[in-house]
Image (cartoon, rainbow, N blue to C red):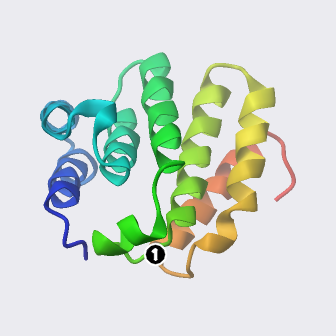
Amino acid sequence: MTTDPTLARIGQGVELHHHRGQREAARDLFAQIWDDIGGEQGDPLHVCVLAHSMADVQDDVHQELMWDLRALAAADRVTDEGVAQAGVALPAAGLYPSLHLNLSECYRKLGDLGRAREHLQQARAGIGALGDDEYGRLIKGGLERLAEQLGEAI
């Protein structure tokens, strides 16, 4: 459980989207948080998690891709210290498998199968940073489904 108030607010948006089906309300909340944190100039962990979440509520795949690329760029600035201070029980490297999974899916939707496969491989390469918990299994399952869609060996 995170101790970071901004991550808790992002979690509220995720709840709105994934558990209540309120995609537009989640997008509005994420936009407000984005303004509150100073956009891309904000804390890298906040930028990463928020952009990753904002990507999930986009109606246009190009917008989804843009948000996922922002999340990936921010992840490169996230440290294990920053993650630990926020109360997140995951190393900074644990952010990458999900980010690359989502980027791979975006590129698949856009028909750029070469880039989709590149990001799938990057996600697979980082999977060891995830635990054998609900989150780790969720990401691994997503990678398996995407690999099948791309005709990749599992």
Q: What is the x, y in percent for residue 32?
A: 12, 33
Which residue is found at the position 34% from the left and 33% from the top?
Answer: 40
Q: What is the x, y in percent for residue 69?
A: 52, 32
Q: Which quarter of the image is occupied by the N terminus?
A: bottom left
The front one of 58 and 20 is 58
Q: Work out whether 70 lies above or below 145.
A: above
Q: Which quarter of the image is occupied by the C terminus?
A: bottom right
Secondary element at tag 1 = helix
The front one of 100 and 42 is 42
Which residue is found at the position 62% from the left and 64% from the top?
Answer: 140
- Residue type at tag 1: Glu
Q: Work out whether 82 lies above or below 109.
A: below
Q: Work out whether 32 lies above or below 75.
A: above
The reply to whether residue 147 is visible in this rendering is no
Q: What is the x, y in percent for residue 58?
A: 35, 27
The reply to whether residue 38 is visible in this rendering is yes
Q: What is the x, y in percent for residue 62?
A: 49, 17
Q: Which residue is mark 1?
A: 134
Relative side of 132 to 19, left or right: right
Which residue is found at the position 19% from the left and 47% from the top?
Answer: 13
